[in-house]
Amino acid sequence: MSKDNDPSRRAFLKFAIAAASGATTGAVVAESSSTITLFDGKSLDGWIQIKNRSTDLKGWIVKHGAMASTGAARGVIYTARDYSRFRLMFTMRHVSGNPDHQACVLIFCTRPQAGELPLDALGGIQFQPPLGGHWDYRLGQNNAGAEEFTRFIKPAYDPHKWSRVEILADASAGTARMAVAQPVGSRGREILGFKNPAAGKVGPIAWQMHNRGLFDEYKNVTVETDPKINDLVTVK
């Protein structure tokens, strides 16, 4: 059977196109049974916030159907489940910051254990959509990385406008790729790649508020586990 006549491939591409346009909201009942919604636009169920000891304010809330950082303090909110090989898709924008910093997504994170202080940024690998900044927060690293990151282009995207982001990651190989589409619904462009087998780690996915005074928003968040198509679909 040719790829064009493969029903499962056609079904997944149909869902991918809808997800790329940001059309998926609420519970996903998709042709790809391995794709689930991580945020329903109504609550933070399925996510865990790490309370910053410097403030009693919550770092993340639901605002106008989006997961929104409150600018309270540096910290993260992470998924209740762990992920190994996955396609993460979401729509985001950086609203403002004082002091300013780009929005941050963390993968290959270390889940905090009961009674232990969490690692800074969960010791994960940081991607900064939509422009492609990055950081390696693993123990003993805490740097921008060297050859493990590849920045393919420097797009002229406006971080304050909504972007559709796709991150394809494989913990077993220590690889990840990020594509961004702006405006939402347009074809994505591959911005950033990562490869370091030693960094690959099964763990939660997280949004990071890099510092106090940052306001970012995320919506239409889905994750496909063990994706059938091992390539970025939003760049097609």
Image (cartoon, rainbow, N blue to C red):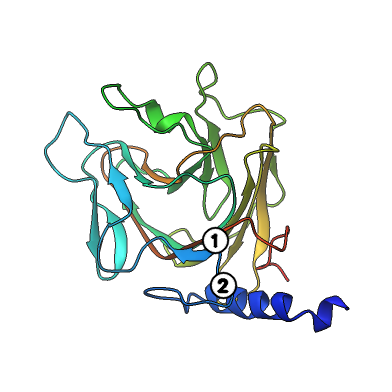
Q: Residue at x 30, y 21 (%)?
A: 116
In the rendered image, the quadrant that contains the C terminus is bottom right
Q: Nearer the viewer, residue 232 or 40?
A: 40
Kindly identify which residue carries mark 1. Answer: 165
**Mark number displayed over residue 137:** none
Q: Secondary structure at mark 1?
A: strand
How far apart, in angstroms, are the residues tagged by discs 1 and 2? 8 Å
Quarter location, residue 172:
top right
Q: Nearer the viewer, residue 61 or 2?
A: 2
How many callouts does the rendering have? Answer: 2
| Residue 125 horizontal/vertical position (percent) | 54, 36
| Residue 143 horizontal/vertical position (percent) | 54, 25
| Residue 185 horizontal/vertical position (percent) | 56, 77
| Residue 13 horizontal/vertical position (percent) | 67, 76
Categorize mark 2 by other alpha carbons within 10 Å: few (<14), some (14-19), many (20+): many
Q: Residue at x 44, y 66 (%)?
A: 161
Q: Residue at x 56, y 52 (%)?
A: 131
Disc with the residue nearer the chain's start (1 vs 2): 2
Q: What's the residue type where badge 2 is placed?
A: Ala
Kindly identify which residue carries mark 2. Answer: 20
Residue 109 in view of the camera:
yes
Q: Nearer the viewer, residue 186 or 16?
A: 16
Q: Are marks 1 and 2 in contact (CB under 8 Å)?
A: no
Residue 97 in view of the camera:
no
In the rendered image, the quadrant that contains the N terminus is bottom right
